[in-house]
Protein backbone atom coordinates (compact mmCIF):
# COMPACT_ATOMS: atom_id res chain seq x y z
CA UNK A 1 0.00 0.00 0.00
CA UNK A 2 2.78 2.42 0.98
CA UNK A 3 4.77 1.59 -2.17
CA UNK A 4 1.72 2.22 -4.38
CA UNK A 5 1.11 5.61 -2.75
CA UNK A 6 4.80 6.55 -3.11
CA UNK A 7 4.61 5.74 -6.81
CA UNK A 8 1.37 7.72 -7.05
CA UNK A 9 2.89 10.79 -5.32
CA UNK A 10 6.43 10.54 -6.59
CA UNK A 11 7.83 10.93 -3.06
CA UNK A 12 8.06 9.17 0.33
CA UNK A 13 4.67 8.41 1.89
CA UNK A 14 5.80 7.99 5.51
CA UNK A 15 9.04 8.33 7.48
CA UNK A 16 9.28 8.34 11.29
CA UNK A 17 12.24 10.72 11.18
CA UNK A 18 9.87 13.57 10.25
CA UNK A 19 8.43 13.41 13.79
CA UNK A 20 11.74 12.86 15.61
CA UNK A 21 12.75 16.53 15.61
CA UNK A 22 11.60 19.77 17.28
CA UNK A 23 10.05 21.18 14.08
CA UNK A 24 7.93 18.10 13.30
CA UNK A 25 6.33 17.82 9.90
CA UNK A 26 4.48 15.28 7.76
CA UNK A 27 5.74 13.92 4.44
CA UNK A 28 4.42 15.68 1.34
CA UNK A 29 2.82 12.47 0.02
CA UNK A 30 0.95 11.96 3.31
CA UNK A 31 -0.32 15.54 3.15
CA UNK A 32 -1.44 15.18 -0.45
CA UNK A 33 -3.31 11.90 0.14
CA UNK A 34 -4.50 11.26 3.70
CA UNK A 35 -5.04 14.87 4.77
CA UNK A 36 -6.95 15.57 1.56
CA UNK A 37 -8.86 12.36 0.92
CA UNK A 38 -10.13 11.69 4.46
CA UNK A 39 -12.11 14.97 4.81
CA UNK A 40 -13.28 14.67 1.21
CA UNK A 41 -14.39 11.07 1.79
CA UNK A 42 -16.33 12.17 4.86
CA UNK A 43 -18.05 14.81 2.73
CA UNK A 44 -19.04 12.41 -0.07
CA UNK A 45 -20.26 9.72 2.33
CA UNK A 46 -22.60 12.07 4.23
CA UNK A 47 -23.58 14.33 1.31
CA UNK A 48 -26.48 12.09 0.15
CA UNK A 49 -28.00 12.28 3.63
CA UNK A 50 -28.33 16.05 3.16
CA UNK A 51 -29.01 16.17 -0.60
CA UNK A 52 -31.72 13.49 -0.92
CA UNK A 53 -34.26 15.22 1.39
CA UNK A 54 -33.78 18.43 -0.63
CA UNK A 55 -34.42 16.59 -3.91
CA UNK A 56 -37.51 14.81 -2.53
CA UNK A 57 -38.95 17.96 -0.95
CA UNK A 58 -42.11 19.28 -2.62
CA UNK A 59 -41.78 22.72 -1.03
CA UNK A 60 -41.58 25.78 -3.22
CA UNK A 61 -38.14 27.08 -4.12
CA UNK A 62 -36.96 29.81 -1.76
CA UNK A 63 -35.92 33.17 -3.09
CA UNK A 64 -32.22 33.99 -3.34
CA UNK A 65 -30.59 35.69 -0.36
CA UNK A 66 -27.35 37.66 -0.12
CA UNK A 67 -25.75 34.98 2.03
CA UNK A 68 -26.68 32.26 -0.50
CA UNK A 69 -25.19 34.29 -3.36
CA UNK A 70 -21.96 34.85 -1.40
CA UNK A 71 -21.63 31.12 -0.76
CA UNK A 72 -22.17 30.29 -4.43
CA UNK A 73 -19.65 32.92 -5.58
CA UNK A 74 -17.00 31.58 -3.17
CA UNK A 75 -17.67 28.03 -4.32
CA UNK A 76 -17.38 29.05 -7.97
CA UNK A 77 -14.07 30.80 -7.27
CA UNK A 78 -12.77 27.67 -5.54
CA UNK A 79 -13.74 25.60 -8.57
CA UNK A 80 -11.96 28.07 -10.87
CA UNK A 81 -8.83 27.95 -8.71
CA UNK A 82 -8.85 24.14 -8.85
CA UNK A 83 -9.37 24.21 -12.63
CA UNK A 84 -6.46 26.64 -12.98
CA UNK A 85 -4.23 24.33 -10.93
CA UNK A 86 -5.32 21.36 -13.04
CA UNK A 87 -4.51 23.31 -16.22
CA UNK A 88 -1.11 24.31 -14.80
CA UNK A 89 -0.35 20.65 -14.04
CA UNK A 90 -1.31 19.66 -17.58
CA UNK A 91 1.04 22.31 -19.03
CA UNK A 92 3.93 21.16 -16.81
CA UNK A 93 3.29 17.56 -17.78
CA UNK A 94 3.28 18.46 -21.47
CA UNK A 95 6.53 20.43 -21.24
CA UNK A 96 8.54 18.41 -18.71
CA UNK A 97 6.74 15.08 -18.29
CA UNK A 98 6.83 12.82 -15.23
CA UNK A 99 4.38 14.89 -13.17
CA UNK A 100 3.02 12.83 -10.20
CA UNK A 101 -0.57 11.63 -10.62
CA UNK A 102 -1.58 13.19 -7.31
CA UNK A 103 -1.22 16.66 -8.84
CA UNK A 104 -3.99 15.69 -11.24
CA UNK A 105 -6.18 14.02 -8.60
CA UNK A 106 -6.36 16.70 -5.92
CA UNK A 107 -7.30 19.66 -8.14
CA UNK A 108 -9.95 17.44 -9.70
CA UNK A 109 -11.35 16.97 -6.19
CA UNK A 110 -11.41 20.77 -5.68
CA UNK A 111 -8.98 20.62 -2.78
CA UNK A 112 -5.76 22.62 -2.63
CA UNK A 113 -2.54 20.97 -1.48
CA UNK A 114 -1.13 21.91 1.93
CA UNK A 115 2.63 21.70 1.48
CA UNK A 116 4.93 24.69 0.77
CA UNK A 117 5.13 25.14 -3.00
CA UNK A 118 8.34 26.28 -4.63
CA UNK A 119 7.09 27.69 -7.93
CA UNK A 120 5.21 31.01 -7.90
CA UNK A 121 2.04 30.05 -9.84
CA UNK A 122 1.23 27.13 -7.52
CA UNK A 123 2.13 29.24 -4.49
CA UNK A 124 -0.37 31.94 -5.56
CA UNK A 125 -3.10 29.39 -6.34
CA UNK A 126 -2.57 27.70 -2.98
CA UNK A 127 -3.12 30.89 -0.99
CA UNK A 128 -6.07 31.96 -3.13
CA UNK A 129 -7.75 28.59 -2.53
CA UNK A 130 -6.82 28.62 1.15
CA UNK A 131 -8.28 32.10 1.65
CA UNK A 132 -11.48 31.19 -0.20
CA UNK A 133 -11.87 28.05 1.90
CA UNK A 134 -11.53 30.04 5.11
CA UNK A 135 -14.11 32.57 3.91
CA UNK A 136 -16.51 29.81 2.86
CA UNK A 137 -16.04 28.05 6.20
CA UNK A 138 -16.83 31.28 8.06
CA UNK A 139 -19.90 32.06 5.94
CA UNK A 140 -21.22 28.50 6.30
CA UNK A 141 -21.49 29.06 10.06
CA UNK A 142 -24.51 31.33 9.45
CA UNK A 143 -27.96 30.07 8.54
CA UNK A 144 -29.28 31.01 5.09
CA UNK A 145 -32.81 32.24 5.89
CA UNK A 146 -35.08 33.16 2.98
CA UNK A 147 -37.68 35.94 3.49
CA UNK A 148 -40.58 33.47 3.34
CA UNK A 149 -39.05 31.33 6.12
CA UNK A 150 -38.48 34.20 8.57
CA UNK A 151 -42.00 33.84 9.97
CA UNK A 152 -41.44 30.11 10.48
CA UNK A 153 -38.21 30.93 12.32
CA UNK A 154 -40.09 33.21 14.69
CA UNK A 155 -42.54 30.42 15.53
CA UNK A 156 -39.72 27.89 16.01
CA UNK A 157 -36.05 29.03 15.85
CA UNK A 158 -34.84 25.43 15.60
CA UNK A 159 -36.12 25.26 11.99
CA UNK A 160 -33.81 28.09 10.83
CA UNK A 161 -30.88 27.33 13.14
CA UNK A 162 -27.43 26.93 11.58
CA UNK A 163 -25.25 23.85 12.06
CA UNK A 164 -23.23 25.40 14.90
CA UNK A 165 -26.40 26.67 16.55
CA UNK A 166 -27.96 23.19 16.32
CA UNK A 167 -25.07 21.27 17.86
CA UNK A 168 -24.62 23.81 20.68
CA UNK A 169 -28.38 24.48 21.24
CA UNK A 170 -27.73 28.21 20.90
CA UNK A 171 -31.17 28.63 19.28
CA UNK A 172 -32.71 27.72 22.65
CA UNK A 173 -30.97 30.55 24.53
CA UNK A 174 -33.61 33.20 23.78
CA UNK A 175 -36.41 31.42 25.64
CA UNK A 176 -34.07 30.70 28.57
CA UNK A 177 -33.26 34.41 28.97
CA UNK A 178 -36.93 35.29 28.54
CA UNK A 179 -37.85 32.83 31.29
CA UNK A 180 -35.14 34.33 33.50
CA UNK A 181 -36.54 37.85 33.08
CA UNK A 182 -40.23 36.95 33.52
CA UNK A 183 -42.44 33.89 34.00
CA UNK A 184 -43.14 32.17 30.69
CA UNK A 185 -46.68 32.15 29.34
CA UNK A 186 -48.34 29.94 26.74
CA UNK A 187 -47.76 32.60 24.07
CA UNK A 188 -44.01 32.41 24.68
CA UNK A 189 -43.82 28.70 23.88
CA UNK A 190 -42.76 27.92 20.30
CA UNK A 191 -44.74 25.83 17.86
CA UNK A 192 -43.68 22.29 17.03
CA UNK A 193 -41.94 21.47 13.79
CA UNK A 194 -44.23 20.00 11.14
CA UNK A 195 -42.60 16.57 11.37
CA UNK A 196 -43.10 16.52 15.18
CA UNK A 197 -46.82 17.30 15.08
CA UNK A 198 -49.26 14.52 15.95
CA UNK A 199 -50.82 14.46 12.48
CA UNK A 200 -47.50 13.81 10.72
CA UNK A 201 -46.37 11.31 13.37
CA UNK A 202 -49.59 9.29 13.29
CA UNK A 203 -49.73 9.28 9.47
CA UNK A 204 -46.32 7.59 9.32
CA UNK A 205 -47.17 5.33 12.28
CA UNK A 206 -50.47 4.17 10.73
CA UNK A 207 -48.84 3.43 7.37
CA UNK A 208 -46.20 1.21 8.97
CA UNK A 209 -48.76 -0.32 11.35
CA UNK A 210 -50.93 -1.59 8.48
CA UNK A 211 -47.91 -3.24 6.84
CA UNK A 212 -46.74 -4.87 10.07
CA UNK A 213 -50.26 -6.00 11.01
CA UNK A 214 -50.56 -7.84 7.70
CA UNK A 215 -47.30 -9.66 8.43
CA UNK A 216 -48.37 -10.45 12.01
CA UNK A 217 -51.75 -11.82 10.84
CA UNK A 218 -50.03 -13.99 8.25
CA UNK A 219 -47.77 -15.39 11.00
CA UNK A 220 -50.85 -15.99 13.17
CA UNK A 221 -52.52 -17.98 10.40
CA UNK A 222 -49.40 -20.11 10.03
CA UNK A 223 -49.34 -20.82 13.78
CA UNK A 224 -53.03 -21.75 13.77
CA UNK A 225 -52.56 -24.12 10.83
CA UNK A 226 -49.68 -25.84 12.65
CA UNK A 227 -51.80 -26.04 15.80
CA UNK A 228 -54.69 -27.65 13.91
CA UNK A 229 -52.35 -30.18 12.35
CA UNK A 230 -51.01 -31.17 15.78
CA UNK A 231 -54.36 -31.33 17.59
CA UNK A 232 -57.34 -31.78 15.36
CA UNK A 233 -56.36 -32.86 11.89
CA UNK A 234 -59.07 -35.44 10.88
CA UNK A 235 -56.77 -37.13 8.38
CA UNK A 236 -54.21 -37.71 11.13
CA UNK A 237 -56.88 -39.22 13.45
CA UNK A 238 -58.32 -41.51 10.77
CA UNK A 239 -54.87 -42.86 9.93
CA UNK A 240 -54.51 -44.29 13.46
CA UNK A 241 -55.32 -47.92 14.03
CA UNK A 242 -58.07 -48.95 16.45
CA UNK A 243 -55.49 -50.23 18.96
CA UNK A 244 -53.60 -46.91 18.93
CA UNK A 245 -56.79 -44.94 19.54
CA UNK A 246 -57.72 -47.26 22.44
CA UNK A 247 -54.26 -46.71 24.00
CA UNK A 248 -54.70 -42.93 23.77
CA UNK A 249 -58.11 -43.13 25.50
CA UNK A 250 -56.65 -45.26 28.33
CA UNK A 251 -53.77 -42.79 28.86
CA UNK A 252 -56.20 -39.87 29.00
CA UNK A 253 -58.34 -41.65 31.62
CA UNK A 254 -55.27 -42.43 33.78
CA UNK A 255 -54.14 -38.78 33.90
CA UNK A 256 -55.16 -37.26 37.26
CA UNK A 257 -57.69 -34.51 37.00
CA UNK A 258 -56.71 -31.22 38.61
CA UNK A 259 -58.98 -30.04 41.36
CA UNK A 260 -60.50 -26.64 40.74
CA UNK A 261 -59.87 -23.99 43.34
CA UNK A 262 -62.61 -21.66 44.49
CA UNK A 263 -61.20 -18.60 42.74
CA UNK A 264 -60.51 -20.33 39.42
CA UNK A 265 -62.73 -19.63 36.43
CA UNK A 266 -64.03 -22.42 34.26
CA UNK A 267 -62.09 -23.03 31.07
CA UNK A 268 -64.10 -21.77 28.17
CA UNK A 269 -61.74 -23.32 25.65
CA UNK A 270 -58.14 -23.08 24.50
CA UNK A 271 -56.40 -19.72 25.05
CA UNK A 272 -56.80 -17.32 22.16
CA UNK A 273 -53.81 -16.38 20.08
CA UNK A 274 -53.22 -12.88 18.76
CA UNK A 275 -50.93 -11.23 16.19
CA UNK A 276 -47.55 -10.69 17.85
CA UNK A 277 -44.60 -8.33 17.45
CA UNK A 278 -46.28 -5.81 15.16
CA UNK A 279 -46.13 -2.87 17.59
CA UNK A 280 -42.38 -3.01 18.24
CA UNK A 281 -41.53 -3.35 14.56
CA UNK A 282 -43.95 -0.51 13.70
CA UNK A 283 -42.31 1.84 16.20
CA UNK A 284 -38.84 0.83 14.98
CA UNK A 285 -39.73 1.56 11.34
CA UNK A 286 -41.47 4.84 12.12
CA UNK A 287 -38.74 6.31 14.31
CA UNK A 288 -35.66 4.48 13.01
CA UNK A 289 -33.85 7.68 12.00
CA UNK A 290 -33.91 9.24 15.47
CA UNK A 291 -33.19 5.87 17.06
CA UNK A 292 -30.12 5.19 14.91
CA UNK A 293 -28.80 8.73 15.38
CA UNK A 294 -29.20 8.48 19.15
CA UNK A 295 -27.35 5.14 19.17
CA UNK A 296 -24.57 6.56 16.95
CA UNK A 297 -24.03 9.57 19.22
CA UNK A 298 -23.93 7.31 22.28
CA UNK A 299 -21.44 4.94 20.66
CA UNK A 300 -19.11 7.84 19.80
CA UNK A 301 -19.40 9.24 23.34
CA UNK A 302 -18.67 5.86 24.97
CA UNK A 303 -15.71 5.26 22.65
CA UNK A 304 -14.20 8.62 23.58
CA UNK A 305 -14.58 7.77 27.27
CA UNK A 306 -11.72 5.29 26.77
CA UNK A 307 -9.66 7.77 24.73
CA UNK A 308 -9.41 10.50 27.40
CA UNK A 309 -7.48 8.40 29.98
CA UNK A 310 -4.99 7.33 27.30
CA UNK A 311 -4.37 10.95 26.27
CA UNK A 312 -3.98 11.92 29.93
CA UNK A 313 -1.46 9.10 30.35
CA UNK A 314 0.54 10.40 27.37
CA UNK A 315 0.42 13.94 28.73
CA UNK A 316 1.75 12.81 32.13
CA UNK A 317 4.52 10.86 30.38
CA UNK A 318 5.40 13.98 28.37
CA UNK A 319 5.71 16.09 31.53
CA UNK A 320 8.03 13.54 33.15
CA UNK A 321 10.20 13.17 30.02
CA UNK A 322 12.78 15.94 29.74
CA UNK A 323 13.80 14.92 26.20
CA UNK A 324 10.27 15.16 24.77
CA UNK A 325 9.55 17.82 22.14
CA UNK A 326 7.29 20.76 22.94
CA UNK A 327 4.92 20.07 20.04
CA UNK A 328 3.98 16.73 21.64
CA UNK A 329 2.66 18.48 24.74
CA UNK A 330 0.62 20.93 22.66
CA UNK A 331 -0.75 18.05 20.60
CA UNK A 332 -1.84 16.03 23.64
CA UNK A 333 -3.44 19.08 25.29
CA UNK A 334 -5.38 20.01 22.15
CA UNK A 335 -6.53 16.42 21.60
CA UNK A 336 -7.65 16.17 25.25
CA UNK A 337 -9.71 19.34 24.88
CA UNK A 338 -11.25 18.25 21.57
CA UNK A 339 -12.10 14.82 23.00
CA UNK A 340 -13.96 16.37 25.93
CA UNK A 341 -15.73 18.80 23.60
CA UNK A 342 -16.92 16.07 21.20
CA UNK A 343 -17.96 13.92 24.16
CA UNK A 344 -20.15 16.68 25.55
CA UNK A 345 -21.74 17.47 22.17
CA UNK A 346 -22.49 13.80 21.43
CA UNK A 347 -23.98 13.16 24.87
CA UNK A 348 -26.28 16.20 24.74
CA UNK A 349 -27.42 15.30 21.22
CA UNK A 350 -28.10 11.75 22.42
CA UNK A 351 -30.26 12.95 25.32
CA UNK A 352 -32.11 15.41 23.08
CA UNK A 353 -32.91 12.72 20.52
CA UNK A 354 -34.01 10.26 23.23
CA UNK A 355 -36.39 12.80 24.81
CA UNK A 356 -37.77 13.67 21.38
CA UNK A 357 -38.14 9.97 20.52
CA UNK A 358 -40.02 9.27 23.75
CA UNK A 359 -42.45 12.15 23.20
CA UNK A 360 -43.06 11.16 19.57
CA UNK A 361 -43.73 7.51 20.49
CA UNK A 362 -46.13 8.60 23.23
CA UNK A 363 -48.00 10.96 20.88
CA UNK A 364 -48.32 8.26 18.20
CA UNK A 365 -49.65 5.64 20.63
CA UNK A 366 -52.13 8.06 22.20
CA UNK A 367 -53.41 9.07 18.75
CA UNK A 368 -53.78 5.40 17.73
CA UNK A 369 -55.64 4.51 20.93
CA UNK A 370 -57.86 7.58 20.64
CA UNK A 371 -58.77 6.71 17.05
CA UNK A 372 -59.56 3.11 18.03
CA UNK A 373 -61.79 4.25 20.90
CA UNK A 374 -63.63 6.67 18.61
CA UNK A 375 -64.21 3.89 16.05
CA UNK A 376 -65.54 1.51 18.73
CA UNK A 377 -67.83 4.18 20.20
CA UNK A 378 -69.15 5.21 16.81
CA UNK A 379 -69.93 1.59 15.84
CA UNK A 380 -71.63 1.04 19.23
CA UNK A 381 -73.75 4.16 18.83
CA UNK A 382 -74.68 3.11 15.29
CA UNK A 383 -75.78 -0.33 16.49
CA UNK A 384 -77.70 1.27 19.37
CA UNK A 385 -79.55 3.59 17.00
CA UNK A 386 -80.43 0.69 14.66
CA UNK A 387 -82.19 -1.05 17.54
CA UNK A 388 -84.50 1.95 17.79
CA UNK A 389 -83.22 3.05 21.19
CA UNK A 390 -81.71 6.33 19.98
Image: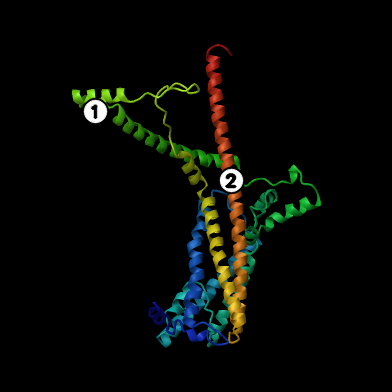
Which quarter of the figure has residue 96?
Answer: bottom left
The percent position of residue 46, horizontal first and vertical second, equals 50, 61
Callout 2 secondary element: helix
Quadrant occupied by the N terminus: bottom left
Callout 1 secondary element: helix
Q: Report the residue at 37% width, 23% height from top.
A: 257
Residue ID for mark 2: 358
Count of all numbered marks drawn on residues in the image: 2
Relative to residue 219, is residue 97 depicted above or below? Answer: below
The percent position of residue 339, horizontal first and vertical second, equals 59, 68
Q: Are marks 1 and 2 in contact (CB under 8 Å)?
A: no
Query: Label 2 crowding class (10 Å Cα cut-off): few <14, some 14-19, many 20+?
Result: few
The percent position of residue 65, horizontal first and vertical second, equals 64, 59
Q: Which mark is residue 236?
A: 1
Which of these two is toward me, 185 or 110?
A: 185
Q: CA distance from mark 1 to mark 2?
A: 51 Å
Relative to residue 369, is residue 308 depicted above or below? Answer: below
* Residue 23 shows in the view: yes
The type of colouring in the image is: rainbow
Amino acid sequence: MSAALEEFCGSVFWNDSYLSRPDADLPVCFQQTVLVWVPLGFFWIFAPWQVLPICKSKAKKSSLTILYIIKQVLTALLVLAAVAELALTSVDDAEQGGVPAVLYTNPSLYIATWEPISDLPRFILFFISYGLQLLLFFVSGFSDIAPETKEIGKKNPEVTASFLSSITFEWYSSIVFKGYRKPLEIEDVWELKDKDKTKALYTAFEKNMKTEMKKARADLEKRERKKRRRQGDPDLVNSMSKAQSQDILVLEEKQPKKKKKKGDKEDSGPPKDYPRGWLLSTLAKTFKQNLLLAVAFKVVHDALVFVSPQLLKLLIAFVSDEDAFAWQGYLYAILLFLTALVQSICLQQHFSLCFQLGINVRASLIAAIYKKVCMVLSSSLLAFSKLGCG
